Image: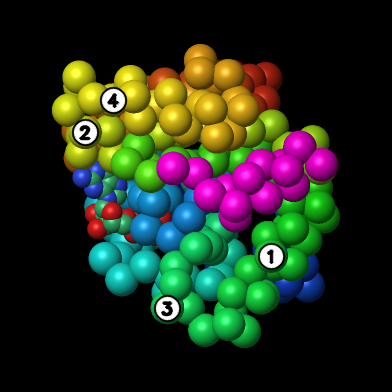
Amino acid sequence: MKISSAEFIKSATRPGNYPPDEFPEIAFAGRSNVGKSSLINVLVNRKSLVRTSSTPGRTQLINFFKINDQFSLVDLPGYGYAKVPLAVKKAWGPMIRTYLEVRQSLHGVVFIFDIRRVPREEDIRMLDWLEEFGVPTIPVITKIDKINRSQREKHIRQIVAETGLPKDAFSLFSATTRDGCEDIWERIEAALDPVSMEGE
Ligand SMILES: Nc1nc2c(ncn2[C@@H]2O[C@H](COP(=O)(O)OP(=O)(O)O)[C@@H](O)[C@H]2O)c(=O)[nH]1
Ligand SMILES: [Mg+2]
């Protein structure tokens, strides 16, 4: 994917504040600190279009970005960070679920797992919602640079087992080495609609 423009549109928490759904949209989901923002920045080849953080749990807004004036990417708030206030934790579920339910232009969700972590309850809940609303899902295992090649398979098998998703459904990614970037783009393009991307 050649990126000619990438711009922040706005943040929102509820449908009344979403930008108009005039472009096909791909959202990125996963627990806090999993590497969502880093993945988006690598995909669009911008160092800091999306703010990354070593203090997880800060982003509790749905952030919309417009790419090439053609489609949108959405950074969804993460979950699972212990220090987030209870009120914020409680708001997360309805905020995400509503987005997945009502967003007409949503073409798919890139669902990100950390290779070092076993998927937890919130991850499984997200997967259930994606299934409930029939949202095509692109599962990605990220931070693969953190685990030696010889150890990776073991970690991947655990994520496969916990999620129940087929092993070959997962793309492997590293924001550090950019491994997996092209593979993920291919799958995003397929989800966006190959016809509208023709000639780009
Ligand atoms: N080594 C390594 N670090 C990563 C990778 N992706 C993200 N990180 C780091 O993980 C932390 C959280 O990343 P961020 O993108 O802010 O996560 P988010 O909370 O899911 O948006 C940051 O310190 C990133 O630099 C990766 O693929 N490899
Ligand atoms: Mg982030």
Residue drawn 55% across the image and 34% down it: 162
Give the mark nearer the N terminus: 3 vs 1. 3
Ligand 1 within 8 Å of the CB at mark 4: no
**Residue that carries the numbered disc 4 in the rendered image:** 152
Q: Is the residue marked by circle 3 packed among few (<14), some (14-19), or many (20+) residues within 10 Å?
A: few
User: Disc 1 residue type?
Assistant: Gly
Q: CA distance from mark 4 to mark 1?
A: 31 Å
Tags 4 and 3 touching, CB below 8 Å: no
Compared to residue 190, the image places residue 116 above or below, namely below
| Whether label 2 touches label 4, CB < 8 Å | yes
Q: Which of the two discs, 4 and 3, labels the residue nearer the N terminus?
A: 3
Asked whether disc 3 touches disc 2, contact meaning CB atoms under 8 Å apart, the reply is no
Residue 83: assigned label: 3
Q: Amino acid at mark 4?
A: Arg
Residue wearing tag 1: 93
Query: Which one is in front in this view, the residue at disc 4 or the one at disc 1?
Result: 4
Give the image location of residue 173, x and y in percent. Answer: 34, 31
Q: Give, as a single range, the part of the protein colored magenta.
A: 118-132
Distance from disc 2 to disc 4, alpha carbons, whole Å, reads 6 Å
**Marked residue nearer the N-terminal end (4 or 1):** 1
